[in-house]
Image (cartoon, grey):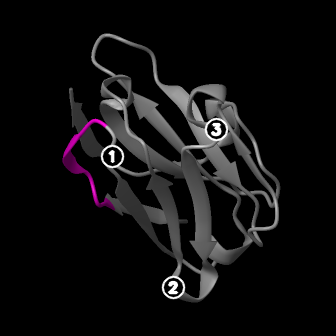
Amino acid sequence: QVQLVESGGGLVQAGGSLRLSCAGSGRTFSSSAMGWFRQAPGKEREFVATINWRGGSTYYADPVKGRFTISRDNSKNTVYLQMNSLKPEDTAVYSCAARRDLGIATAEDRYDYWGQGTQVTVSS
């Protein structure tokens, strides 16, 4: 069992930066691939980024490539999402998720545990 708690969301102006954190509990965190997803009002939840269990493999959705960076620190049971050059269209609730697997994945149904989410609002 893995429990996930996100933090770091907030209100930021367009062009600004935020760093989200996702703290995990449970012995299996370090052997879990992780992902970030987001859901904007009135829209379906969408994939943002994923990282494998050791942090050596990552993958990003096209809209965030070059602006967002996913990373992890297994000694702290934490995964991060550094978000730079934020745009109003990045406004959403951001959730982290964990897999009972080592490798990256982009599909929601590949993830077994989910956090509650943190709100990110980007003003123009």
Residue 9, magenta (yes or no): yes
Q: What secondary structure is marked by label 2?
A: helix
Mark nearest the camera among 3 and 2 is 3
Residue 10, image x, y percentages: 20, 49
Give the amino acid at mark 1: Gly
Residue furthest out toward the front:
15
Q: Where is residue 116 drawn, in percent x and y?
A: 32, 48
What predominant SS class does the magenta segment belong to?
Answer: strand
Task: Give the residue at x 60% y 71%.
Answer: 72
Q: In terms of image quadrants, where is residue 120?
A: top left
Q: Residue at x 45, y 16 (%)?
A: 44
Instruction: Kindly identify which numbered label has been placed on residue 117.
Output: 1
Instruction: Specify which label sits upstream in the sequence, 3 or 1.
Output: 3
3 versus 116 height, above or below: below
Q: Which residue is mark 2?
A: 76
Q: Secondary structure at mark 1?
A: loop
The answer to whether residue 89 is above or below residue 81 is above
- Frontmost residue, 65 versus 32: 65
**Mark 1–mark 2 contact, CB under 8 Å?**
no
Q: Which residues are magenta?
A: 7-14
Whether residue 113 sits left or right of residue 49 in the image: it is left
Q: CA distance from mark 1 to mark 2?
A: 19 Å
Circle 3 is placed at which residue position? 65
In the displayed structure image, the side of residue 60 where residue 13 appears, left or right: left
Which badge, 3 or 2, is on the more N-terminal residue? 3
Amino acid type for the residue under numbered disc 3: Lys
Q: CA distance from mark 3 to mark 2?
A: 26 Å
Q: Which quadrant of the figure contains the N terminus? A: bottom right
User: Mark 3 and mark 1: span between their CA atoms?
Assistant: 21 Å
